[in-house]
Image (tube, rainbow, N blue to C red):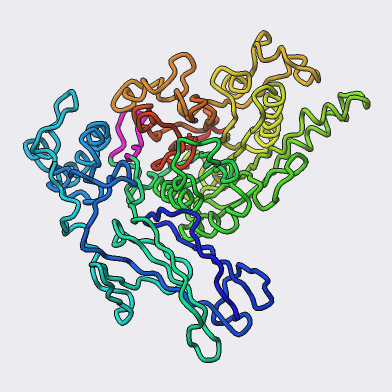
Amino acid sequence: MLSVLRVHLPSDIPIVGCELTPYVLLKRPDNSVVADDVTESNPIDGSFLRYKWYRVQSDKKVAICTVHPTEQATLQCLGCVKAKIPVAKSYHCSPKCFSDAWQHHRVLHERAASAVNENGNEEEEIFGRFNSTGSTTSNMINMNLPTSQSNPSLSNGTTALYPAAVTQRSGGETWFEVGRSKTYTPTADDIGHVLKFECIVVDADSKLSVGPASTLSTSRVIPAPSPSPRRMISVIGIDVPGHVDLDSRISSAGTFTVLSYNILSDIYATSELYSYCPSWALSWTYRRQNLFREIIGYHADIVCLQEVQSDHFEEFFAPELDKHGYQALFKRKTTEVFSGNINTLDGCATFFRRDRFSHVKKYEVEFNKAAQSLTDALVPSAQKKNALSRLVKDNVALILVLEAKFGNQGIDNPGKRQLVCVANTHVNVHQELKDVRLWQVHTLLKGLEKIAASADIPMLVCGDFNSVPGSAPHSLLAMGKVDPIHPELAVDPLGILRPAGKLTHQLPLVSAYSSFARVGVGLALEQRRRMDPGTNEPLFTNCTRDFIGTHDYIFYSADSLSVESLLELLDEDSLRKDTALPSPEWSSDHIALLAEFRCKPRTRR
């Protein structure tokens, strides 16, 4: 007889919107062990498994801290109640928690006040009771929220999915059946409640249960943490209204938006590397939902992602973004160095909205092939093995030529196709191999030059270059050349960077985010303190315990494109104190970059 040996969850902490799929280990009559999903339509040994999920509602109601979702709340922000902000965002576990979070919590109040267009006095009543030092007043927060008292906002409702299956239990608990499949996705109604999973073997002929049920209980369901929204900031002197998380936000006529984001591949997201991030927030089941919500919320016309695993592209990102109108293309890294499961090998994925662009052509750059050609041409035969060992790093670039479907005020060239070339790359090279990193960037740029020479086409170069501002690769991208006395040129054991005069390109590339340094009006002025004045680049796009700095860029050809607006940068105060990325709010160790561009009218030749 088929029997259940073990049932467990990869993570004990359930989060709203994140699938729960228990691991069920089965023992067959011949004593072999399987972990298959044995359904009624596909029984094994005359048996199948029947699953049920229950929400366990207790007389004791518990509020969850919005900042520390694994902690029980002890106080509530009354300003949130007045402003009709979702109640789950109003709870805090301690006065210190509320005080530390006030700078960003206040944004919720401001947004709510702005949305209802209330007068200044009412806004002051809602969020003005924090003084400049960040202290609280007794009427701002409810310090006496009893954890045992039922709160109407926490009542998840008692209407079960399957009313006949409601089972009364002793000890002040009621079980409400909420699901009948192996996988369950917690909803807002589950917040603060324990979930119970039940698995039982059923005879395929009689449909009667065989043996006792195997069960497990989760900890209390917590809401998905949500970071403060990032706004689009105009760099042409007029602030862009609203926030980027509004569903109504779209590019204005003649403009388009481009997102670049290293999403942190699951194979690299280990507890050893990111011990400061809670294990539940580091799990892929949580991160994929959080990343997806963030990406979709930007409403970008073109999305360039790095560190996308092959299996995650095929099984998650491509189908899910397809539902939102995006066409997807993917270039997996090559496998000369990689020795793991090829399905988990990451690469670059580019998505574009079908209603805004159509696909014209695709180019794939494999730096390993370029390394082979280089060593064949420059390196003596006896040294080729060592040379390839240094140069071959499996990195790739994905280049797309797209045709715009939107109008671009094309009166100068009526009827002319508006093409855009978008390069997406991840130059993942060890920091000691500065010559290899520079060579890969130079190789990519020379390829883009050939495309530019064959067509009058704007260029966008996006990605994680693992190069800080002022480095040789950054200088090559931003300045079109590298100073011959740049210190990074001193290490060149293969002679691939000589003569230094060859390290040039003719593409008129400019870093999109350098626009913040050139504009001194409106909200763009606020962004200046988040920029490095020496390099005109963000202070950081990558923030871990071991490194904080800029590795990610969106470069554009300034002769044919202009920047209209940029997604605001995070500052260190935007990150929770004493932590880094990834975090429960931000699911990558990088931040997303988003730029809005306008195609310039082309002069007739």
Q: Residue furthest left?
A: 121
Closer to the camera in the image, 9 or 591: 9
- Give me the residue at 43% from left, 54% from top: 12
Q: What main secondary structure does the magenta stretch of the protein show?
A: loop
Is residue 28 depicted above or below 448 in this figure? below
Report the number of numbered marks: 0
- Give me the residue at 59% from left, 78% from top: 2
Q: Position of residue 390 (x, y in %)?
A: 77, 28
Side of 463 where 200 appears, left or right: left
Q: Is residue 89 magenta?
A: no
The N terminus appears in which quarter of the rendering? Answer: bottom right
Range of the magenta residues?
228-241
Query: Quadrant of residue 160 in the image?
Result: bottom left
Q: Position of residue 366 (x, y in %)?
A: 73, 39
Closer to the camera in the image, 443 or 92: 92
Closer to the camera in the image, 68 or 372: 68
The C terminus appears in which quarter of the rendering? Answer: top right
